[in-house]
């Protein structure tokens, strides 16, 4: 392309920018390493989570053809979807102020766990938060969650107070 005529069609596109992430602080970003074959057939290239203060956003990256200025243009853009946590019950004061960690589950593609600042674990599927788990005995921030490929039914959870927990996720 020439420097005289630069626009969104004939110049490089930034796939992710700060405009897409929102106004709140982003503390983490987790790309799904295990995309299902069915999702790939439906045109899903990638999916990822951006999480931080007061919000979690789920992104799907798909290729699509759009008509721009009389031409067909292939775009690869993430489409954000904000997770709604209010349907889980409880008072508004019980919402997480900070989401600290995320872990995609190998055995169940597009399912992931979110860890909060109160030791709460959230079970999520794509852009939906399905369940809140508070009975694991965790009282501090969930700093790390890990699903190991050689042991896909176990998730290791570490907290800031030094607790380390192994959870069986085969029933999710």
Image: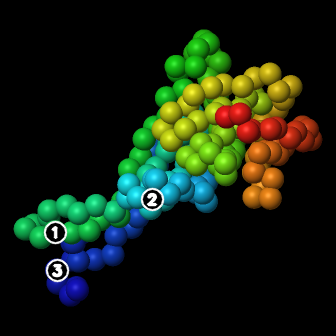
Mark 3, residue position: 5
- Please say if 159 is above or below 10: above
Q: Residue at x 38, y 50 (%)?
A: 79
C-alpha separation, residue under disc 2 versus residue under disc 1: 22 Å
First in sequence: mark 1 or mark 3? 3
First in sequence: mark 3 or mark 2? 3
Q: Quadrant of residue 161?
A: top right
Of badges 1 and 3, nearer the viewer stands 1
Res. 98 in view: no
Looking at the rendered structure, the secondary structure element under dot 2 is helix
Res. 32 in view: yes
Label disc, if present, on residue 40 of the rendered structure: 2
Mark 1, residue position: 72
Of badges 3 and 2, nearer the viewer stands 2
Query: Which residue occupies the foreground of this view, 37 or 34?
Result: 37
C-alpha separation, residue under disc 3 versus residue under disc 2: 35 Å
Of badges 2 and 1, nearer the viewer stands 2
Query: Which residue occupies the foreground of this view, 2 or 38?
Result: 38
């Amino acid at each position: 392309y020439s420097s005289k005529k630069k626009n969104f069609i004939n110049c490089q596109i930034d796939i992710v920018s700060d405009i897409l992430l929102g106004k709140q602080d982003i503390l983490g970003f987790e790309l799904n390493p295990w995309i299902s074959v069915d999702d790939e057939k439906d045109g899903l290239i990638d999916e990822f989570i951006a999480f931080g203060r007061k919000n979690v956003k789920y992104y799907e990256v798909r290729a699509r053809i759009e008509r721009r200025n009389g031409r067909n243009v292939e775009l690869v853009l993430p489409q954000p979807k904000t997770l709604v946590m209010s349907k889980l019950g409880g008072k508004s004061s019980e919402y997480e102020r900070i989401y600290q960690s995320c872990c995609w589950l190998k055995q169940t593609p597009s399912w992931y766990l979110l860890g909060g600042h109160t030791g709460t674990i959230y079970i999520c599927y794509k852009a939906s938060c399905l369940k809140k788990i508070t009975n694991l005995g965790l009282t501090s921030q969930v700093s790390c969650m890990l699903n190991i490929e050689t042991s896909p039914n176990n998730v290791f959870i570490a907290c800031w107070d030094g607790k380390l927990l192994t959870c069986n996720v085969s029933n999710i």
